[in-house]
Image (tube, rainbow, N blue to C red):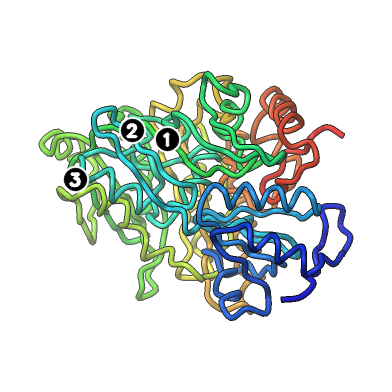
Amino acid sequence: MGDVSITTTGGTEIMIKEEAIGAFRASLRGDILEPRDAQYDDSRKIWNGMIDKRPALIVRCAGVSDVLQCVRFARSHQVPVAVRGGGHNVAGYAMCNGGMVIDLARMRSVQVDPVRRTARAEGGAIWADVDHETQAFGLATTGGTVSDTGIGGLTLGGGFGWLMGKHGLTCDNLLSLDMVTADGQFRAVRATEHPDLFWAVRGGGGNFGVVTAFEYQLHPVGPVVAGMLLYPVAQAKSVLAHCCDFLRTAPEELGVVAGLLTSPEGAALCGVVVCYNGPQAAGERVLQPLRAFGTPSLDSIGLVSYHQVQTMLDPALPRGRKYYVKANLMRDVNDGAIETLVQGFATVPSRYTMALLVHLGAAPGRVRPEETAFYYRETGYHFEILSGWDDAQHSEANIAWTRQLWNAMQPFGSGGIYINQMVDEGEQAVRTAYGPVAHQRLVDVKTTYDPLNLFRHNQNIRPRS
């Protein structure tokens, strides 16, 4: 132990005395890691290998009491705070330089009420944890497309997933949450308690506090008809056009992600991944027009567990690889967008990169834009370029290529941005992501609950001065 150097919320460097750190440590059931500790370097690694930040303190919380102590300590010493749930955010906001990381990774319990069809999950849980417990009862809620995504970041930013066409976004299934706000107080937040905060956390990101538990509405989800169709890239234009045309009348039980990728052998491919949440016979009938089109080199569609669907894309997005993402929302996908996408992908510099069109389905649009902070409800697709590579010397080339293709696709966008897939777009893009009315309302909530902007390691909504 010893004095600890901290970069304060005001940007100055101060030393916090050993005695203060010792008292803080003694107040915790969890533990504190400093840069000199053996486990420090492993604990600051997150999903995106591009992120290399060095916090002064990593506090591995064991429960709500620890979170309360962390926020109160940070507030009293003006210590910047980052919150780590699953650590899957591509921008790396789970870590910070010179401040404190409130690490919730040990807080992963999930409790299911099969009668009420609800689940209560601690803030450090990942979707694999939730799916494991809920599927024991034949239940699930909209929860991403990669199983080791943290529930916290996905939910607070909106939340796309295989079930959203019928059951809405993850935040639309949020019934309540427990939160420690910047004043060091615990708050149970729901529609009838702190309704302004409940509105804001459904899409407003991690701007308002540390969520220690989420309560979700669950839905019956048994075995699903799911899998992947792969085609040689020469068929990409016709396959994507057919897929997008097919989706204009597809039932809400069907979730689809289509796009371009590269095989392990280096061949460019067009892929269509599907998940039909309903009876097998109906799913096979619905999917027949997709499966009959073109000449797929692979058709893996069959009856599988929902858990298998949730892990299907995991091997393509492992932890530790270097990632960069550019994304935006689209109302529709026309021939010009498909032509631009296919031409741009022809020069992709990494075999780990994918360019995807995620169909959002009907249910998100049934929620009025003003009901939650997730504003863009009338959009049809989320376009995302997930660039990945291993060698740091290739970072500049991969980032430049990603930006180039994204810029080329902008004429086909709706103007909307999904907050969870933003990286370096800046403050104006944050305003755009919410629209002017919702953003001003978010500023009001931020000013009420975090007037000093303690929680700023996020796509930040600044409080009024």
x, y percent for residue 71: 68, 48
The answer to whether one can see residue 242 in this image is no
Q: How far apart are the two marked residues, 3 and 2, measured between alpha carbons? A: 39 Å
Where is the C terminus found, in terms of image quarters? top right
Helix, strand, or loop for circle 2?
strand
Looking at the rendered structure, the kind of residue marked 1 is Glu
Marks 3 and 2 in Cβ contact (< 8 Å): no
How many other residues sit within 10 Å of disc 2, few (<14), some (14-19) or many (≥20)?
many
How many other residues sit within 10 Å of disc 1, few (<14), some (14-19) or many (≥20)?
many
Q: Quadrant of residue 55?
A: bottom right
x, y percent for residue 337: 51, 43
Q: Is residue 446 left or right of residue 67?
A: right
x, y percent for residue 397: 63, 70
Residue position for label 1: 215
Q: Nearer the viewer, residue 109 or 150?
A: 109
Helix, strand, or loop for circle 1?
strand
Helix, strand, or loop for circle 3?
loop
Res. 118 mark: 2
Residue position for label 3: 292
Q: Residue at x 27, y 54 (%)?
A: 228
x, y percent for residue 139: 25, 38
Looking at the rendered structure, the kind of residue marked 2 is Thr
Label located before the other in sequence (3 or 1): 1
Q: Quadrant of residue 462?
A: top right
How many other residues sit within 10 Å of disc 3, few (<14), some (14-19) or many (≥20)?
few
Determine the residue located farthest toward the left in the rendered image: 281
Instruction: Name above or below for residue 210 compared with residue 229.
Output: above
Looking at the rendered structure, the kind of residue marked 3 is Ala
The mark closer to the camera, 3 or 1, is 1
Where is the N terminus found, in terms of image quarters? bottom right
Q: Nearer the viewer, residue 272 or 143?
A: 143
The answer to whether one can see residue 284 in this image is yes
